[in-house]
Amino acid sequence: MSEAQEFDSFAAFYPFYLAEHNNVTCRRLHFVGSTLVLALLAFVVTTAQWTFLLLLPVVGYGFAWVGHFFFEKNKPATFTYPWYSFMGDWVMYKDMLTGKIRF
C-alpha cells in the first residue's frame, strides 16, 4: 500500500481490506487473535478482573500484525484506516466462521 486511498464507505473499503489478506496464514492469525479477544472479554466480564482489558489490543493486533509482517508481507491497513480496519476484522471473522471466506 503505497498511497492512501479514499473510501467513502465501509462497503467500498471491504474489498480492499480483503485484498490485503490474501495469505491464508495471515487470515488464520487474524482469526486466532479475534477469537482470543472474545475469550478474554468473556473472562474479564465473568471475573471482573478489569485490568485484563489492557491486553485486548495486544492480543487482537499482535496476531494480526505477525500475519501481515511475516506472511502477507504488507503494512496492516489499520495504520491508515483504523476504524474501517477494525470493522473489517470482525466482518472477515464472521465471513470465515460462515464459510464465505476460506479459513
Image: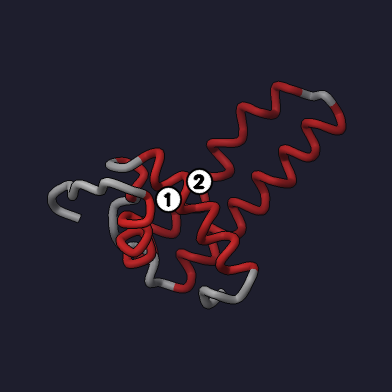
Specify the label residue 62 is tagged with: 2
Specify few, some or many for label 1: CA neighbours under 10 Å numbering under 14, 14-19, or 20 or more.
many
- Whether pointer 2 and pointer 1 mark residues with C-beta atoms closer than 8 Å, the reply is yes
Q: Residue furthest right?
A: 46
At a point 44% along the width and 59% down the height, the residue shown is: 67
Q: Quadrant of the N terminus?
A: bottom left
Name which quarter of the figure residue 17 lies in.
bottom left
Q: Is residue 72 left or right of residue 1?
A: right
In the displayed structure image, the side of residue 67 where residue 69 appears, left or right: left
Which amino acid type corresponds to the residue marked 1 in the rendered image? Trp
Q: Residue at 60%, 36% (x, y): give it.
A: 56
Which is more toward the observer, 92 or 49?
92
Write the residue at 60% across / 61% down.
Answer: 94
Closest to the observer, 98 or 103: 98
Secondary structure beneath dot 1 equals: helix
- The x, y position of residue 12, in whole percent, is 31, 56
Q: Is residue 4 above or below residue 41?
A: below
Give the residue at x 42% y 50%: 65
Q: Which mark is residue 100?
A: none
Answer above or below: position of 2 versus 80.
Answer: below
In what element is the residue under mark 2?
A: helix
Location of the C terminus by quadrant is bottom right
At label 2, the amino acid type is Gly
Residue 21 lies left or right of residue 40; in this view the side is left
Residue 65 - label: 1
Q: Quadrant of residue 68?
A: bottom left
